[in-house]
Amino acid sequence: IVWSLANPLNDIKNLVVKSILPPHATFKEFFIPSSANVMFDKNIGLLEWRVGTLEGGTGFLRPALSLSFQVGVIPSVADVGNSIQIISSSEASGIDSFTEKTISTSHGEITTDLLSDPKVDFSQRKVVE
């Protein structure tokens, strides 16, 4: 999974990106860049990327800031023939350094039905026995 951040305007401070992994998913403790401040609470499945400050112009005047990480899933027999959730919706939240207001954005869940990935064909999107 890749989380990618862009910010056209003011610096955003105290930025945190988070999501919950479903019970059938495991965080593989492998992420790039390895220096990123990533925390995982396996008791509740909470994955957090504590970005800190995201400079204005990131993703526009300079490259986007990204975190790539691995998640494993173990489907059940009841999942056969269906796509399953890999990660719940993700939310990024921080404070605009100029206005001092909290800003946030979210992205929907990611499932094995990876329609935007041209390398994944139809037969790979569903759980098989």
Image (tube, grey):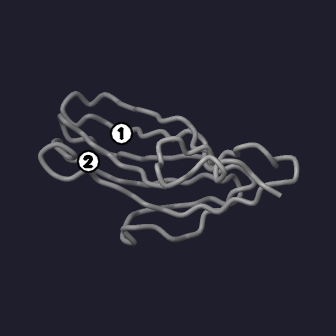
In this picture, is 46 found above or below 88? below
- Secondary structure, mark 1, is strand
Give the class, few, some or many, for how many residues have Cα within 10 Å of label 2's Cα (few <14, many ≥20): many
Residue at position x 22%, y 46% in the image: 59
Q: Where does label 1 land, which residue?
A: 94
- Choose mark 1 or mark 2, whichever is in front: 2
Label whose residue precedes the other's in the sequence (1 or 2): 2
Mark 1 and 2 residues: CB-CB less than 8 Å, in contact?
yes
Residue at position x 31%, y 28% in the image: 101
- Secondary structure, mark 2, is strand
In this picture, is 75 found above or below 19? below
Residue at position x 27%, y 50% in the image: 53
Left or right: 110, with 9 as reference point: right
Three-letter amino acid code at disc 2? Answer: Leu
Position in image of residue 58 (x %, y %) = 20, 46
Q: Where does label 2 land, which residue?
A: 54
Left or right: 123, with 49 as reference point: right
Quarter assignment of residue 36: bottom left
Three-letter amino acid code at disc 1? Answer: Gly
Left or right: 73, with 3 as reference point: right
